[in-house]
Image: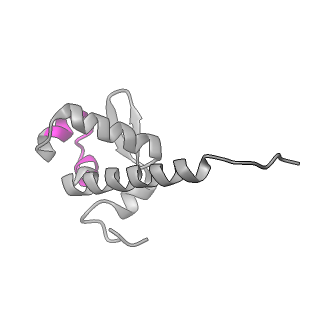
Amino acid sequence: MTPTGPSPALFFDTLNGYQRTEALRAALELDLFSHVAAGRRTAEDLGAACGAAPRGVRILADYLTIVGFLRKTGDRYELSPDAAAFLVVHHISFGIP
């Protein structure tokens, strides 16, 4: 039997939901997923392709890695299967949940 009582879960889930939404919005605005799919895998390459600072791209891409949209090995990013299927702009299933 689990003890019941006040929990901050709803509060934290709500805050994290907003953060995930804004990170995804920023990545789509930068077309980050399409650039990763095209072979630009480091923050420096992605920054150049997106017209953004590599440091900012690294922070965004690391967050997207934590929440599961990207994977990271060393300094290189790759798409998760879900991101590859739904978030690459010219992919046949782009934006179809």
Specify the segment rendered in magenta.
Answer: 33-47
In the image, residue 47 sits, relative to residue 9, either above or below, namely: above
Can you say which quadrant of the picture contains the C terminus?
A: bottom left
How is this picture coloured?
A: one colour
Looking at the image, which residue is at 25% across and 63% down?
A: 89
Is 72 in front, or is 64?
A: 64
* Left/right of residue 62 with respect to residue 38 in the rendered view: right
Considering every residue shown, the one lying at the far front of the view is 6
| x and y, in percent, of residue 10 in the image | 58, 54
Which residue extends farthest top? 74
Q: Which residue is pictured at 22% across the width and 31% down the height?
A: 55
Q: Nearer the viewer, residue 11 or 24?
A: 11
| 44, above or below 90, in the image | above
Which residue is located at x 32 percent, y 71 percent? 92
Instruction: Give percent across and percent down for residue 90.
Output: 24, 65
As displayed, is residue 54 above or below residue 91? above
Position of 58 with respect to 84 (left or right) is left
Indicate whether residue 58 is drawn in magenta.
no
On screen, 30 above or below 87? above
Indicate the position of residue 23 as horizontal and vertical percent values: 33, 50
- At 12% across and 39% down in the image, what residue appears? 48
